[in-house]
Image: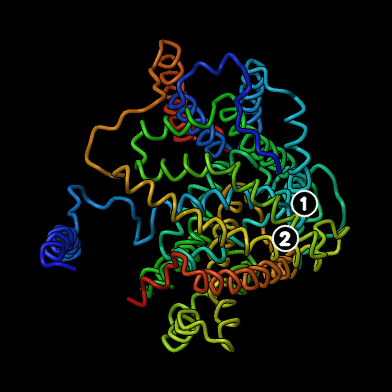
């Protein structure tokens, strides 16, 4: 349960958090906008190029895919067998109207299935791409500068800074419960795991709530919410590279919307 | 003791008594004086809950996201303990649970993406879960019903959900959630049992409250996944019994934790949303 809050050293590290958030949003919108495999392959290729430019480890890609391969297979199978296509490629059986199967595997079904799987891959790797190259405090600063309410950003940053102490508390509780005979390694026994998680969660939540009172007193004594111009320990500024990337992102977004309106990018 | 000695002693005592009287007067003045007035608006609260508590909850949520609980074949890697946190958040924090869950959800989605099948918008699912249960707990049932209807409606807006049997998907828990929200005697009984911490009825009431929270989260996830990956009834309908099983397990676990947390918070006299309702 060790949480790594450090950002990887990367050429993308120097970009402003707002630039990365904008690029992330544009890629996310574009991948949802298109359903043609060629367009999504192009997007995926672009994201992968950025991934390697960012010098992020390819092992991370593999790890992410390990979590999602099952849903990818299911999406592919469902679309191949049940997507309503017109170009028959292979006859499998007689039509089975009860389960909505035409009896044929169609070109459209395969293409749409591949497109949906690629969409999943892009969606899953694009967020880590942005985040792994940005330290979380800078990301929070970017959110505040994007006019996300300060209290919301404060909750996120405070939660992040409290993580180590809560993790520490969780491990102390686990050790204490181990002394009482509660095992957290029940070897696949689901009921045992459930009991163990209950015995962890209740004292963890109660202890953390006790801490919140101290935090509240500290916040009040420092006049949290006073109407003063807030300054930040960290600061960020747009550079030429940021402006270029934002401009390219906007052009890509507008271009994508225009293509979609003209009827391109769908299958 | 001579008269002169007595007068000397009384002279010594008088100043001491005077000082004591002055101190008592000062203390009385302090006690009776008006409480210091804040010169700024109290911004340390969101929907009545302290920002500090919300930050703590968000941190707990992030830590819970790192604890895998249930492997889920065919969906995002696994269900983590954060599913329990979402289901009980409305009870503990009220409508502010939406804010705490959103903050925790955004950060944990970044740190542990395997718990979120809806990608960058995955935090919306836990936000809706906290919001609906929190609104119900705060007795803002009209808003809770509107949110729940919007969630169910967003499922049915997708043409994919007009296929055979797709109406069954939101039925098991979202329908129950909507009934709990809309039917006044049920709603009042659930709230009253939790507020008064009734020894007998608290368990089923917490179960229903967790059902409301979890149903909102779960259907929002399903809807987002359906919009993104265009899954047809051939996926949703056959897997429905499995999802009902997973939901039931999550809600049962949430009820166990939820009852313990609610009782513990009250016993320890810690900040509890329901206390603000008592007032």
> Residue drawn 40% across and 73% down?
B275
Question: Compared to A153, does A249 lie above or below?
Answer: above
Residue position marked by numbered label 2 in the rendering:
B234
The residue furthest top is A240
The residue shown at (55%, 18%) is: A13
Q: State which mark lies toward you, 1 or 2.
A: 2
Query: Which quarter of the figure is the C terminus of chain A placed in?
Result: top right
Determine the secondary structure under disc 1.
helix
Horizontally, residue B188 falls left or right of residue B117, namely left
Crowding near pointer 1: few (<14 within 10 Å), some, many (20+)?
many
In this rendering, would B252 be left or right of A19? right
Residue A106 shown left or right of residue A150 in the figure: right
Which residue, given by chain and number where applicable, does mark 1 sit on? Answer: A81
| Residue at 57% across, 67% down | B215
Which x, y percent locates residue A247?
41, 19
In percent of width and height, residue A231 lies at 31, 28
Q: Is residue B124 above or below residue A38?
A: below
Q: Which mark is residue B146?
A: none
Q: Is residue B33 visible?
A: no
Q: Give the residue at x 20% y 64%.
A: B31
Estimate the x, y position of residue A65 in percent, counting from the top left. Answer: 75, 37
C-alpha separation, residue under disc 1 versus residue under disc 2: 9 Å
Chain letter for mark 1 = A
Q: Is residue B13 above or below residue A112?
A: below
Answer whether labels 1 and 2 touch (C-beta < 8 Å): yes
Which image quadrant for residue B165? bottom right
Q: Quadrant of residue B207?
A: bottom right
Tell me the element at label 2: helix
């Amino acid at each position: 349960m060790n949480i790594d809050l450090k950002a990887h050293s990367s050429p993308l590290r120097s970009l402003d958090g707002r630039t990365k958030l904008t690029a992330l949003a544009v890629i996310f919108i574009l991948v949802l906008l298109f359903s043609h495999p060629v367009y999504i392959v192009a997007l995926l290729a672009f994201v992968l190029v950025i991934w390697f430019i960012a010098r992020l480890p390819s092992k991370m890609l593999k790890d992410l895919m390990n979590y999602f391969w099952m849903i990818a297979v299911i999406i592919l199978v469902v679309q191949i067998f049940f997507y309503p296509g017109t170009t028959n490629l292979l006859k499998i059986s007689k039509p089975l109207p009860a389960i909505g199967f035409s009896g044929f595997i169609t070109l459209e079904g395969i293409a749409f299935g591949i497109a949906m799987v690629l969409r999943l891959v892009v969606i899953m790797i694009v967020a880590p791409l942005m985040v792994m190259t940005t330290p979380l405090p800078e990301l929070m600063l970017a959110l505040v500068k994007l006019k996300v309410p300060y209290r919301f950003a404060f909750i996120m940053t405070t939660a992040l800074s409290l993580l180590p102490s809560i993790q520490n508390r969780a491990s102390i509780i686990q050790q204490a419960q181990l002394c009482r005979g509660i095992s957290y390694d029940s070897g696949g026994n689901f009921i045992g795991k459930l009991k163990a998680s209950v015995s962890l969660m209740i004292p963890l939540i109660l202890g953390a709530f006790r801490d919140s009172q101290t935090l509240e007193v500290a916040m009040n004594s420092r006049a949290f919410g006073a109407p003063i111009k807030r300054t930040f320990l960290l600061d960020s500024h747009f550079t030429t590279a940021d402006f270029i990337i934002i401009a390219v992102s906007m052009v890509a977004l507008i271009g994508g919307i225009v293509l979609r309106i003209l009827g391109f990018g769908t299958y | 003791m001579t008269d002169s000695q007595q007068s000397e002693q009384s002279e010594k005592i008088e100043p001491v008594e005077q000082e004591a009287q002055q101190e008592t007067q000062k203390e009385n003045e302090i006690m009776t004086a008006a409480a210091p007035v804040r010169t700024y608006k109290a911004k340390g609260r969101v929907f009545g809950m302290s920002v500090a508590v919300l930050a703590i909850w968000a941190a707990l949520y992030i830590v819970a996201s790192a604890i895998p609980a249930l492997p889920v074949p065919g969906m995002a890697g696994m269900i983590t303990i954060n599913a329990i946190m979402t289901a009980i958040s409305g009870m503990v924090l009220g409508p502010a649970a939406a804010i705490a869950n959103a903050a925790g959800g955004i950060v944990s989605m970044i740190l542990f993406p395997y718990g979120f099948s809806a990608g960058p918008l995955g935090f919306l699912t836990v936000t809706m879960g906290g919001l609906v249960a929190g609104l119900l707990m705060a007795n803002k049932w009209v808003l809770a019903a509107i949110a729940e209807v919007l969630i169910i409606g967003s499922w049915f807006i997708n043409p994919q959900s007009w296929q055979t049997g797709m109406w069954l998907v939101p039925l098991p828990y979202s329908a129950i959630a909507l009934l709990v929200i809309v039917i006044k005697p049920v709603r009042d009984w659930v709230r009253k049992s939790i507020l008064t911490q009734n020894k007998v009825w608290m368990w089923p009431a917490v179960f229903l409250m967790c059902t409301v929270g979890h149903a909102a989260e779960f259907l929002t996830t399903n809807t987002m996944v359906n919009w993104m990956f265009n899954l047809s009834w051939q996926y949703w309908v056959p897997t429905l019994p499995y999802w009902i099983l997973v939901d039931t397990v999550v809600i049962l676990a949430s009820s166990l934790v939820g009852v313990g947390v609610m009782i513990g918070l009250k016993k320890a006299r810690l900040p509890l949303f329901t206390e603000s309702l008592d007032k």
